Image (cartoon, rainbow, N blue to C red):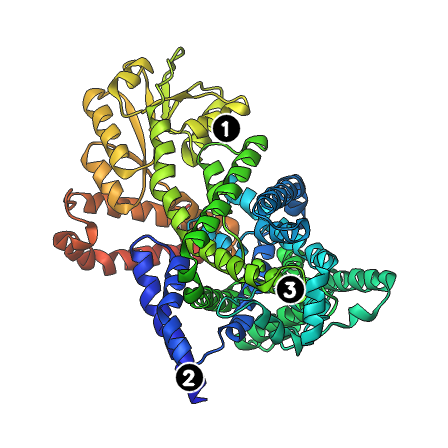
């Protein structure tokens, strides 16, 4: 127990110290965990810690991550992704395998060894890429969606790879392994390791086979190995059907029954039990636990318990993934690395450049443009955690000699270590370049003007423009996002590219004759600057402005705007009205109660506007805070009295 607590303390202190520092420096949590693992590797060696055994446990975080990813995807969405999943993913794995195989043969490897190396290095890191894309909010981008499609295909491709690799066995290696009593365990590893990852860079890769020979990881050989081919197929199909049917039919009544106890920890335990059961079932039939839980997540994507499952599983997933990344860093064999540092670094960089080039070509073919193609190419340029599994499997199957596998293990680990650096390169260099290019695009020539100018055609400006158009009003739309305009033009909608803050562009749009200016651009400073210019130079123009927050409302009021719309205010009022209805208030009274709150809030804001100080945030404005505290109880009492009167039917209609 003492050793376990000491080990837990070492891992936690490493993560707690390294990750916040890395995040603060903009390096991301993944790089923080990897650095933490490297930093504590001497301590783990001193304590004689088996990093491989720890990673067997930590890799379950990858299984949980794919379950949560599945919860975000409805089956319909997955079907819509089929072209990217099969086309983009299939071409990436096939082309990368072929090219890596070619280079390996040029370096003197036989075609069987080269093919095995190509399959191992064609895979990318699901754990690192998805974690980083989620942290940076890039999962829904074109590059993020393409990356997910390729990663999902790679995870599926691991299964046929595990079945195919033993066919590449070298006779001389088979004889050598048989003489040492190791051969024959390759088939046992296929089912046991299909869903996990393993860092075995600490010693020779042959030592990895000793870990598996006793069946420690995954519970030993799976029973499917002893079945004829047609029976294997039936069992595999039956396992997948059990996951789909169980997720569709059994989970709802099960979770409803568990929810009756009203114990959150029981719900959490049930969710964990379900994931472990699916992972175990997939391992027993020789399939990937990660893919099994992903399938279960997709099946449960429409369940009413989806969000509860997400909130319960996410903390465990985060902790285990953090531990997984730490073990990747801790498992790097620095002795072997320093003995072969030049060739190892050259192989690592060569692999990442080769994979990035393949991905860039595929991005061009599949229409992934702009900064998204670089996000796609750089994000997937590394080797992945499944590479650890396949390398140890190839050694046990007498396909790749252990000396070569040792170096390849370092290449896999180093490429994963460099991946967060590539994301930083994307964030700080590539993405700003494309943003500047977009900004350097010359403004469109405005050929048609109207009495309404809409500045910004995003979420807010676009809806306003559509409402005006539906009522027969023509508007001149100006937007600074070329991507946004190119997208809406594909649907036959109109708009001009340009910076609405520029006076010459506003003049060309006909602001001197316009009756209404709708300011819906992004950025508080830009909105205020445009409103200030319009109000001061065109006093007869009605200016309607989008306010980002309450502080911004006062700022716009101070420069003369009197038609200010808080961007989340109306939706909040509607939600409050719906809350009244949900509590049993009839819809008519709920409407009047919401209108009463709206009237009071607007009145109090105008009353407090005279105490606004432009250069002082609201929470630091002592005069404003004092006035609000002075009047708050009075406002609440007045509003409560009117609300109760409406509820009791005593208000004057």
- Counting residues from the start of the chain, the first of labels 1 and 3 encountered is 3
Q: Of label 1 and label 2, which has the lower sequence position?
A: 2
Identify residue for label 3: 393
Percent position of residue 373, x then y: 49, 36
- Residue at 68%, 73% (x, y): give it: 182
Secondary element under disc 2, as helix, strand or loop, is: helix
Q: Position of residue 469 (x, y in %)?
A: 48, 23
> Which residue carries the number 1 mark?
487
User: Residue 460: image x %, image y %?
Assistant: 41, 35
Secondary-structure class at tag 3: helix
Callout in the foreground (3, 2)? 3
Query: In this rendering, would 119 be left or right of 642?
Result: right
Can the viewer see residue 475? yes
Classify 218 as above or below 370: below
Q: Residue at x 32, y 62 (%)?
A: 20
Q: Is residue 345 above or below residue 90?
A: below
Q: Is residue 560 left or right of residue 597?
A: left
Could one spot residue 585 in this view of the protein?
no
**Circles 1, 3 touching at the beta carbon (< 8 Å):** no
**C-alpha gap between disc 1 and disc 3:** 47 Å
Camera-side residue of 607 and 235: 235
Side of 111 where 236 appears, left or right: right
The image position of residue 277, as x and y in percent, is: 67, 72
Q: CA distance from mark 1 to mark 2?
A: 55 Å
State the residue lying farthest toward the left: 623
**First in sequence: mark 3 or mark 2?**
2
């Amino acid at each position: 127990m003492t050793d376990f607590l000491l080990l837990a303390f070492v891992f936690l202190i490493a993560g707690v110290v390294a990750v916040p520092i890395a995040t603060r420096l903009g390096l991301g949590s993944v790089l923080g965990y990897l650095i933490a693992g490297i930093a504590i590797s001497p301590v783990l060696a001193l304590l004689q810690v088996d990093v491989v055994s720890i990673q067997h446990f930590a890799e379950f975080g990858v299984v949980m991550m794919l379950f949560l990813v599945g919860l975000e995807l409805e089956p319909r969405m997955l079907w819509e992704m089929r072209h990217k999943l099969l086309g983009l993913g299939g071409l990436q794995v096939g082309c990368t395998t072929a090219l890596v195989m070619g280079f390996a043969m040029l370096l003197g490897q036989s075609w069987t060894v080269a093919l095995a190396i190509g399959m191992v290095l064609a895979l990318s890191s699901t754990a690192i890429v998805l974690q980083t894309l989620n942290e940076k909010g890039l999962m829904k981008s074109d590059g993020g969606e393409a990356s997910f499609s390729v990663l999902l295909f790679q995870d599926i491709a691991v299964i046929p790879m595990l079945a195919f690799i033993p066919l590449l066995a070298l006779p001389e290696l088979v004889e050598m392994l048989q003489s040492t009593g190791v051969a024959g365990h390759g088939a046992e590893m296929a089912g046991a390791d299909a869903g996990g990852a393993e860092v075995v860079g600490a010693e020779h890769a042959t030592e990895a086979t000793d870990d598996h020979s006793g069946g420690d990881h995954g519970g030993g050989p799976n029973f499917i190995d002893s079945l004829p081919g047609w029976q294997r197929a039936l069992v595999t199909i039956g396992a997948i059907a059990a996951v789909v049917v169980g997720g569709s039919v059994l989970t709802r009544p099960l979770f409803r029954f568990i929810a009756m106890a009203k114990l959150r920890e029981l719900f959490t335990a049930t969710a964990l039990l379900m994931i472990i059961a699916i992972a175990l079932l997939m391992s027993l039939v020789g399939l990937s636990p990660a893919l099994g839980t992903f399938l279960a997540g997709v099946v449960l994507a429409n369940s009413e318990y989806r969000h509860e499952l997400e909130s319960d599983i996410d903390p465990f997933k985060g902790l285990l993934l953090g531990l997984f990344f730490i073990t990747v860093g801790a498992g790097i064999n620095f002795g072997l690395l320093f003995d072969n540092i030049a060739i190892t670094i050259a192989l690592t960089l060569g692999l990442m450049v080769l994979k990035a080039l393949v991905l860039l070509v595929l991005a061009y073919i599949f229409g992934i443009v702009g900064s998204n193609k670089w996000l796609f190419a750089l994000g997937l340029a590394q080797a992945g955690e499944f590479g650890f599994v396949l390398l140890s499997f190839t050694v046990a199957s007498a396909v790749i000699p252990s000396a070569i596998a040792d170096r390849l293990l370092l290449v896999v680990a180093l490429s994963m270590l460099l991946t967060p650096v590539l994301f930083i390169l994307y964030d700080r260099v590539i993405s700003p370049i494309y943003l500047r290019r977009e900004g350097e695009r010359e403004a469109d020539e405005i050929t048609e003007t109207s009495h309404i100018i809409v500045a910004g055609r995003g979420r807010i400006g676009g809806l306003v423009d559509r409402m005006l158009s539906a009522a027969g009003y023509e508007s001149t739309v100006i937007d600074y996002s070329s991507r946004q305009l190119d997208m809406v033009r594909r649907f036959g909608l109109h708009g001009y590219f340009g910076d609405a803050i520029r006076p010459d562009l506003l003049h060309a749009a006909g602001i001197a004759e316009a009756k209404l200016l709708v300011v819906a651009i992004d950025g508080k400073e830009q909105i205020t600057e445009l409103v200030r210019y319009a109000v001061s130079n065109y006093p007869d123009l009605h200016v309607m402005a989008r306010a980002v927050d309450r502080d911004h409302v006062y700022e716009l009021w101070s420069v003369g705007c009197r038609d200010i719309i808080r961007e989340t205010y109306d939706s909040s009022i509607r939600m409050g009205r719906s809350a009244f209805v949900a509590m049993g208030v009839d819809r008519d009274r709920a409407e009047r109660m919401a209108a009463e709150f709206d009237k009071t809030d607007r009145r109090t804001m105008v009353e407090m506007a005279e105490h606004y100080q432009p250069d002082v945030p609201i929470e630091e404005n002592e005069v404003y805070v004092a006035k609000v505290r002075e009047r708050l109880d009075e406002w609440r009492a007045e509003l409560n009295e009117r609300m109760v009167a409406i509820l009791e039917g005593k208000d004057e209609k």
